[in-house]
Image (tube, rainbow, N blue to C red):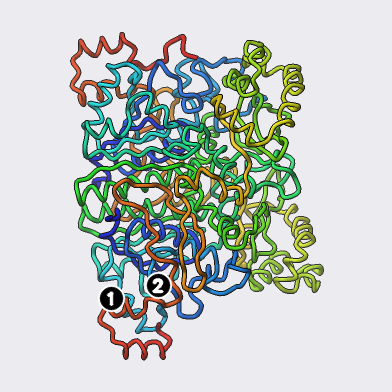
Amino acid sequence: MAKLPLEGIRVVDITVIYAGPFATMNLADWGAEVIRVESIKHFQVLTRGGTAHPNQDIVSDPIRTGGIATYCNRDVSFRPWNRWTLFNAHARNKLGCTMDLTQPKGKEMFKRLIAMSDVFLESNAPHVKENLGLTYDVLKEVNPKLIMLSMPGFGGSGPYKYYRALGVHQEGFIGHTSLRGYPDSDPSTTSTVYHADEAAGATAALAVLMALHYRNRTGKGQHIDMAQAEATMPHLGEAIMDYTMNNRVQESRANRMPGAAPCGCYRCLGEDRWVNITVTSDEEWRGLCRAMGNPEWARDEKFADSLSREHNQDELDRHIGEWAIKNNHYDLMYLLQKEGVPAGPIIFEDDAYTDPHLRERGFFQELTHEECGTHIYPGLGFKISRVPNSIRRPPVRLGEHNEYVYKELLGVSDEEYRQLEEEGHIGMDYLPDIR
Amino acid sequence: MEQALSDIKVLDLTHYIAGPYCTKLLADYGADVVKVERPDGGDPARRMVPFLGDDPHPDKSGLFLHLNTSKRGITLNLKAEAGKKIFRELVKGVDILVENFSPRVMPSLGLSYEELEKINPKLVMTSISNFGQSGPYRDFKASELVIYGMGGAMNETGMFDRYPLKKAGNVIQYQVGTMSAFATMIAFFASQAQGAGQHVDMSMFESQMGTIDRRMSHLITYQYNNETSYRPDPELEPPGFPYGIYACKDGFFQLSGGFVFWPRICKMMDMPELVDDPGFSTQEGQRDPENLERFSIIWYPWIAEHTKLEIITAGQAAGVLCGPINDPGDLVNDPHWKARGFWEEIEHPVAGKITYPGAPFKMDETPWRASRPAPRLGEHNAEVYGELGYSGEDLMLLRQQGVI
């Protein structure tokens, strides 16, 4: 197998929750040696679970159905932090060690690791690295060629520098939440999305590659200041430009898009099954009419041209809805695509694993996790012709590579290793009193 | 100051959103990006809203202006033989080619990766498409809505008793553009290391299927526990309190509380006497509907008396995860992003001086820079074709023949 493009690049990763770990997942996927540094004395809420030692009765309660935040088999009897779906979604291909960065010994070990690494990513609010004394100014003395990327929500300067926010709160700040709710309801019915996490995670991974390229050319490392919110804002460019150009404050259009009618989500046969349809031209409209069997109502002048369809979209949606509900969501995709109409089902998890396209392209991949067993996991998001690639390691367990990191990389003796275990640096379990 | 990618040359055959955002990211960090447009009308994004002053002029689309900063622009008819010849000459001189036609188009023009690789053996070619370069859906049409419904977590966005919702605007295409820039750089590294070209197959569908916004977690939940996701029903499954989006005195704000953060919530409301109330401070207590009722009697009057700014300021001072629900105007006027210098004023010869979103990240050594405004159609024909050795007279003939 060809060498992966990032082989030989070592990344130290203390990022939390979603955005930062997605960045390091992408780097790990393409060959970087990503080492997650965690602490058995400090539980990372959300990253590794709800609490360090969750209550089995509450986890088993059927009213709390799964979601992004649940445990494998809903079983929390043994190391629940290694069974948390939110973590196991991004932790593939990574290595993991534990270290208490609040203790002088931990800081010393950490700096030794930084000295032999290329990249350091962190995503906490800035007071965390400041309190730990692990800022770029300090670390560049240890490793002058270091690339350090800091990605707190609001960046490393400005009045909100120390604000705490998850991606979901940043999206409120930057206007995304106001632009995506039900237009006929107030914002309190807008459900949570984590667009800022995927946007910031992907952007951070790109930023690291740019800095690596510059370092390859000049030998110079650097610090990158990324506000997760700023990485996401360009994604809302049209709404922002409408305001800066025209002083117009855009509001949510739900599933509708300018210049497309119909453009919506229609209920299909089955429980909670749906199809999305977008028509942007007369040709596609005629295709939709053919697919529906050229019904009488579609010949009405109200729907004869794009402007009329836009004006009468509510009525149009009702007609299409009455047709769609009698059909299977996948059948409608095939039928409409055959007539040249952009359409596709809303894909639930069960559909995804049986989807013929994903199957033929080999998207999913089977992995065996020592504590969770063998399952099929979502795979790599893109392919490169001369770099055959697949997931090489299952989601990393807490402290799984302590021996490698301490003994092989840091050159710690067996005796010192035992001492570090006693001092609470090294371990695979959160201490019993950790909440 | 030198920029991170100032030694990289990119030929940009993209249109609409995902492709142009990919090449914008490269261009704003220093790559020399030449955008190729068709002579008759150019990139369709020139005809997409919003327009400056609502005037649908090809140089006044805010979408196009935003997506094409720092690029030079040329026109070229790839269906004409002379156009193909010039295109091959252009390919010879670049490191990277990015295109987002449907998968049949480049091969039908005789410009498949296999053909182009013969001209430039180290070429990185990134092909962005709806469903990828192979598979049964290869030639299917899509839209922002269709891609999100299939690839993303649309099934669980919205309320349980209403239709599923997409995210705002075109954010999925921007996301794919970002992933495409990442993929392009990875392939560029591979090409450098191997001394061989690379073809990147970026499928919007798969890129969303493998993304972190709930999708991967839920795919794994399904594997682990055979549970599918659903749109939330706040009554059925209270995630603890306070939690979610609330109306206050002058608008809406959102906040994530629950028993873990209960002491901080008390600090925010300046009600220290509630800190040890087990009905609020424990997971078991928060699951009892009676305590939710007791809490509501305290909470709703308090938020009704305070503004977004007051609540967020007090909440952040107490370490509560919270924020306002802002609209785009609130965002542009927010003092924080102004203080960080996020916004960029860019002068365009037709559209004039407008404020644009700026750097997605700030690199100490190698800054972001909008080195030029979005190109007018064919603005750099003379310059770029001149670099290939075409004379003014050649260009006149090519224009006359509809090639440029």
Q: Which residue is mark 2?
A: B73
> Does residue B41 lie above or below B221 as drawn?
below
Label 1's element?
helix
Is A123 in front, or is B196? Answer: A123
Q: Report the chain holding disc 1.
A: B
Mark nearer the viewer, 2 or 1 = 2
Q: Residue at x 31, y 10 (%)?
A: A423
Q: Are marks 2 and 1 on the same chain?
A: yes
Three-letter amino acid code at disc 1? Answer: Glu
Residue A267 screen position, x and y as percent: 72, 50
> Does residue B250 lie above or below A80 as drawn?
below
Q: Report the chain holding disc 2.
A: B
| Distance Cα–Cα, label 2 vs label 1 | 16 Å
Q: Is residue A269 left or right of residue B5?
A: right
Three-letter amino acid code at disc 2? Answer: Gly
* Residue A366 sits in quarter: top left
Q: Which mark is residue B89?
A: 1
Q: Which mark is residue A265?
A: none
Label 2's element?
strand
Is B351 in front, or is B8? Answer: B351
Residue B359 screen position, x and y as percent: 42, 51
* Residue A191 sits in quarter: top right
Residue B212 screen position, x and y as percent: 49, 40
